[in-house]
Image (spheres, rainbow, N blue to C red):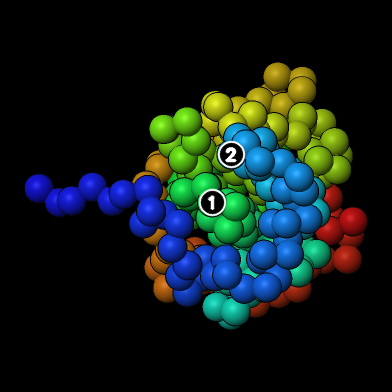
């Protein structure tokens, strides 16, 4: 039987979760402020990652530097995987055990432009989220979509209370399908960079090579 990792394992710094870097420390300190309770710190960090770094699916590339928490902490835009990396790293910086999780999801509100860039599919592989250890249990949180983008699509922003999972909404404000979780890939101590980039290239090669269009719901 394999040994169960202790919470301290999920406080370690790593290649991509480089939370001891000054930029991650600064981001975390600014988000947390005077908060001391772990749940409150987690809520504040989540909101900061969600809204200070806008979601941009066209920012995918194969440069490992762009996936490190220290880089994302000073970026203006990122897609779900780097944003989950920053949330996980900032949580560790705040003393909250955290790890990365991934799932394959179907986006029913995908824009036609993005669908075309993805070869006609609405399947997103390796959607990134975080798992935080709070009150002796793991809770999931995805900081992908900033509040302004959600308003543009008529979807309420995802809120994280530190007690319950905060995953992508199954339906929008009108009751139409939004995000459908198809396959959970489990948790990881650090970012499986090579696996993710390889699959993104195999499935969406053009998306990895082209810049964002001038006008699109994600880039305006």
Front one among 110 and 7 = 7
- Please state if 114 lies on the left or on the right of 179 as rendered: right
Q: Is 216 located above or below residue 194 in the figure?
A: above
User: Residue 80: percent from the left, percent from the top?
Assistant: 62, 54
Residue 84: name its quadrant: bottom right
Q: Secondary structure at mark 2?
A: helix
Q: What residue appears at the point 71 percent right and 41 percent down from the top-left corner?
A: 35
x then y, percent, for residue 70: 64, 71
In the image, 120 versus 61, the foreground residue is: 61
Q: Secondary structure at mark 1?
A: loop
> Is residue 181 at all visible to an observer of this figure?
no
Q: Are marks 1 and 2 in contact (CB under 8 Å)?
A: yes
**Which residue lies most toward the left here?**
1
The numbered mark, 1 or 2, whose residue comes first in the sequence reads 2
Residue 65 percent location from the top left of the image: 60, 79
**Residue marked by disc 2:** 38
């Amino acid at each position: 039987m394999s040994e169960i990792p202790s919470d301290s394992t999920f406080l370690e710094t790593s290649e991509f979760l480089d939370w001891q870097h000054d930029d991650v420390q600064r981001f975390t300190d600014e988000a947390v402020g005077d908060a001391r309770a772990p749940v409150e710190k987690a809520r504040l960090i989540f909101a900061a990652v969600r809204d200070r770094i806008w979601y941009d699916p066209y920012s995918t590339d194969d440069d490992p530097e762009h996936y490190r928490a220290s880089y994302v902490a000073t970026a203006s835009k990122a897609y779900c995987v780097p944003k989950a990396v920053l949330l996980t790293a900032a949580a560790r910086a705040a003393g909250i055990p955290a790890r990365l999780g991934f799932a394959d999801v179907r986006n029913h509100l995908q824009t036609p432009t993005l669908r075309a860039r993805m070869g006609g599919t609405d399947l997103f592989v390796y959607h990134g989220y975080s798992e935080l250890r709070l009150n002796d249990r793991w809770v999931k949180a995805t900081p992908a979509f900033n509040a302004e983008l959600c308003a543009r699509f008529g979807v309420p922003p995802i809120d994280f209370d530190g007690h319950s999972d905060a995953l992508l909404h199954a339906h929008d404000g009108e009751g139409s399908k939004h995000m459908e979780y198809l396959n959970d890939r489990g948790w990881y101590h650090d970012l499986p960079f090579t696996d993710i980039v390889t699959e993104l290239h195999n499935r969406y090669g053009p998306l990895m090579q082209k810049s964002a269009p001038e006008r699109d719901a994600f880039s305006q």
